[in-house]
């Protein structure tokens, strides 16, 4: 007589074997499970029964007919144990209920970190990899504030907005989930290896892909359905007209999730996608309260106050005040500032240096200048 734990382990092996069947895919696997009554029953079905399933490829039916590949399954389980990871299947009680409800929900999930986090209420934050300083600042701040309001931050570990969102959650002592487009043992992008380590310790790394799976481009649109599927709503901070972030937003709408967008500059291609979403009815985000209200979440008392107490404004000369009026939160080149202020180049350089020393202006790559977030 098997114990409940042994039964669960056997069931996981059956789901894994079905998932690892070449050419099958999640949608067809679920169809077969529903038709035959379970993953074990799929493998017990004879060739005659499998051949009667309309649309099932003959080579896939033949692969199933050979029975579970126990060697392949054992290899995955062994690698999970060695890496301190867990594998859960679709009918596992630990599998997130909201993700199970979506179309083409993953058959199995590979998880590293605190398993409980994946079932907590969360918000997806996505956007451009080549994000502006403004976009990264907004993503970081939103993630921190949502974290302080007991929402998990869900993103994809990509450069740009994703990275900023994960950092914002961690800096606020919150929880974050990184959904990967590769195996748990493959770090992509490599520049985020330290961030991935931190999330594996303080949050959760999640993927549907077996160990060793490379980050092929086609995997990322597929993983986006998991980001939106785990979320109550998805916030698009910056996105070009055609981008993976818009795919995530479309999937969120199909899944019945809320979609939010942060407005940006109307002359910036990196904001065009977010503005299109707003035109199509996405909720405009001006403050974190816009998100919390739409999700019917309580707003913490701290959201009615400044997160950081305002610093005392440094004393400014008339020239410094005058030039400060031409500055913006968006980076400007030195030539743009000279043209707007109509001051000599040497004077603009001198004043900008003083404003930078007083913490009111920061210099960016390519000698561009912008107001600091505290100004």
Image (cartoon, grey):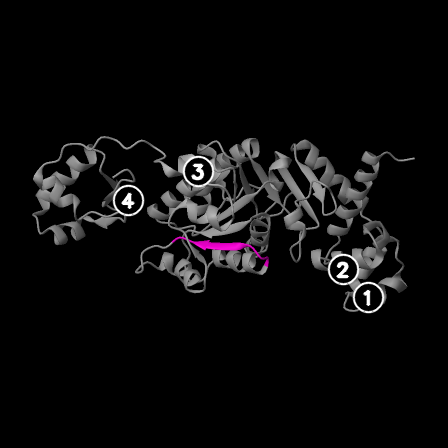
The residues tagged by marks 2 and 4 sit, at their Cα atoms, a distance apart of 53 Å
Q: Which dot marks residue 347? A: none
The residues tagged by marks 1 and 3 sit, at their Cα atoms, a distance apart of 50 Å
Quarter of the image with the C terminus in it: top left
Looking at the rendered structure, the secondary structure element under dot 2 is helix
The residues tagged by marks 1 and 4 sit, at their Cα atoms, a distance apart of 59 Å
Q: Which residue is mark 4?
A: 365
Viewer-side residue, 264 vs 23: 264
Res 359 quadrant in image: top left
Cβ atoms at labels 4 and 3 below 8 Å apart: no
The residues tagged by marks 1 and 2 sit, at their Cα atoms, a distance apart of 10 Å
Looking at the rendered structure, the secondary structure element under dot 4 is loop
Q: Residues within 10 Å of mark 2 (few under 14, many from 20)?
A: few
Viewer-side residue, 367 vs 284: 284
Give residue 153's position: percent from left, percent from top: 51, 42
Picture residue at 77% right of the left edge, 65% below the top? 57
Cβ atoms at labels 2 and 4 below 8 Å apart: no
Q: Which residue is mark 1?
A: 53
**Between tags 1 and 4, which lies in front?**
1
Q: Which residue is mark 3?
A: 144
Looking at the rendered structure, the secondary structure element under dot 1 is loop
**Between tags 2 and 4, which lies in front?**
2
Q: Residues within 10 Å of mark 3 (few under 14, many from 20)?
A: many
- Tell me which label, 3 or 2, sits earlier in the chain: 2
Q: Which dot marks residue 31? A: 2
Q: Which residues are magenta?
A: 255-262
């Amino acid at each position: 007589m098997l114990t409940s734990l042994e039964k669960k382990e056997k069931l996981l092996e059956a789901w894994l074997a079905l998932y690892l069947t070449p050419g099958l895919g999640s949608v067809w696997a679920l169809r077969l499970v529903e038709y035959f009554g379970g993953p074990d029953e799929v493998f017990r079905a004879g060739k005659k029964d499998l051949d009667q399933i309309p649309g099932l490829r003959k080579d896939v039916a033949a692969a199933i007919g050979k029975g579970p590949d126990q060697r392949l399954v054992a290899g995955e389980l062994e690698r999970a144990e060695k890496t301190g990871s867990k594998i859960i299947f679709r009918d596992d009680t630990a599998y997130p209920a909201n993700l199970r409800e979506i179309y083409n929900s993953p058959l199995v999930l590979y998880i590293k970190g605190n398993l409980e986090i994946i079932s907590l209420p969360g918000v997806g934050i996505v956007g451009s990899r080549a994000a502006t300083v403004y976009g990264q600042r907004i993503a970081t701040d939103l993630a921190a504030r949502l974290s302080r309001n007991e929402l998990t931050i869900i993103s994809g570990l990509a450069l740009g907005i994703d990275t900023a969102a994960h950092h914002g959650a961690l800096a606020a002592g919150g929880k974050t989930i990184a959904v990967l487009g590769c195996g748990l043992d493959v770090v992509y992008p490599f520049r985020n290896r330290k961030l991935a380590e931190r999330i594996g310790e303080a949050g959760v790394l999640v993927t549907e892909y077996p160990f060793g799976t490379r980050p092929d481009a086609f995997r990322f649109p597929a993983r986006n359905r998991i980001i939106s599927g785990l979320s109550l709503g998805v916030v698009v901070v910056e996105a070009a007209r055609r981008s993976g972030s818009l795919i995530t937003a479309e999937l969120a709408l199909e899944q019945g999730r809320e979609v939010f967008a942060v407005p940006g500059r109307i002359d910036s291609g990196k904001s065009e996608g977010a503005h299109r979403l707003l035109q199509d009815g996405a909720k405009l985000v001006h403050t974190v309260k816009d998100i919390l209200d739409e999700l019917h979440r309580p707003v913490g008392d701290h959201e009615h106050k400044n997160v950081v107490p305002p610093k005392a404004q440094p004393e400014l000369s008339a020239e410094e005040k005058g030039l400060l009026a031409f500055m913006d939160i968006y980076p400007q080149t030195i030539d743009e500032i000279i043209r707007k202020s109509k001051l000599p180049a040497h004077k603009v350089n001198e004043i900008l240096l003083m404003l930078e020393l007083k913490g009111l202006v920061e210099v960016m790559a390519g000698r561009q200048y912008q107001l600091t977030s505290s100004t």
